[in-house]
Image (cartoon, rainbow, N blue to C red):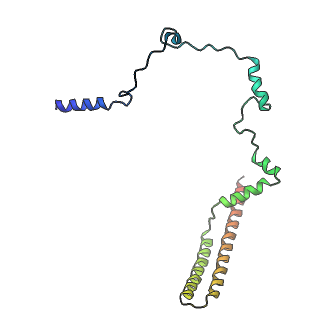
Amino acid sequence: EVLGRKNQEENINIMSSWADASDDPPLEQAPAEYTGGGGVRPRLQLKPRSATAGKSSGASGGGSSKSNPFGAAKPREEVLASKGIDASLVDKRVERKASVPRLTADQDRQVEDLRKELTEIEEKLREANEMELPEEDFRVAAEEKREELNELVKGFHDLNLKERNARDAERR
C-alpha cells in the first residue's frame, strides 16, 4: 500500500502541469532601471491632452469625431429609393419567399387528392412507356395536373398569406 501511494505521488508530480516541465530557461529579473529598483514597474506618467489632438482626427472624418462602425453605409431604404425601387415591395417579396406555406386541413386534403391523381397518371405513363404504347396523352394529362397542382398550392399560399396579414393588421 505504501509502495502504491509512492507511485501515485510520482505520477502526480510528473503530470502536474505543462508549465512546470518547461525546457525554457528561467526568466531573468527586469533591470532595476525599468522597475525603479523595487521590482515594481513605476506608474506611467501621461501628459494632459492637447486641444488640437482631438480635433485633427475629426476634421478628416467628415464632421463627427466619433467613429462609425458602419462607415459611410446608408440605410437600406435610402439606397433602394436612390435606385428607384420601392422598399415595401422588396419587403413583401422577401416575406413571401421566406414564409412557409401552411395549409388548412381542407386545403391539405385538396392538394393530396390532386397529388394522387397526378401519381396515377404518371403510373399510367410509365406503363405505356414500358409496353411501348402511345404515351403522349398521358404526358399531356400529367403536365396539366402538375400545373393545376402548382396553381392550387400557390393560390392557397397567397390566400393564407393575405389572411395572416389581415390578422396581423387587426392586432396592431
Q: Nearer the viewer, residue 58 or 114?
A: 58
Q: Residue at x 71, y 39 (%)?
A: 70
Q: Nearer the viewer, residue 37 or 105?
A: 37
Where residue 54 sits in the image (x, y, percent)? 74, 23
Residue 167 visible? The answer is no
Q: Is residue 62 left or right of residue 100?
A: right
Above or below, comparing residue 60 to residue 111 in the picture: above
Q: Residue at x 77, y 57 (%)?
A: 89
Above or below, comparing residue 150 to residue 132 in the picture: above
Where residue 56 sits in the image (x, y, percent)? 77, 24
Q: Nearer the viewer, residue 94 or 38?
A: 38
Where residue 130 sits in the image (x, y, percent)? 53, 87
Above or below, comparing residue 60 to residue 76 in the picture: above
Q: Residue at x 77, y 28 (%)?
A: 58
Q: Is residue 3 left or right of residue 100?
A: left
Residue 132 visible? The answer is yes
Q: Residue at x 74, y 21 (%)?
A: 53
- Quarter of the rendering containing residue 74: top right
Identify the residue at the far top of this view: 37
Q: Nearer the viewer, residue 8 or 157?
A: 8
Where residue 123 sits in the image (x, y, percent)? 55, 83
Quarter of the figure that contains the N terminus: top left
- Quarter of the rendering containing residue 61: top right
Total labels drawn:
0
- Quarter of the rendering containing residue 6: top left
Q: Is residue 111 left or right of residue 168?
A: left
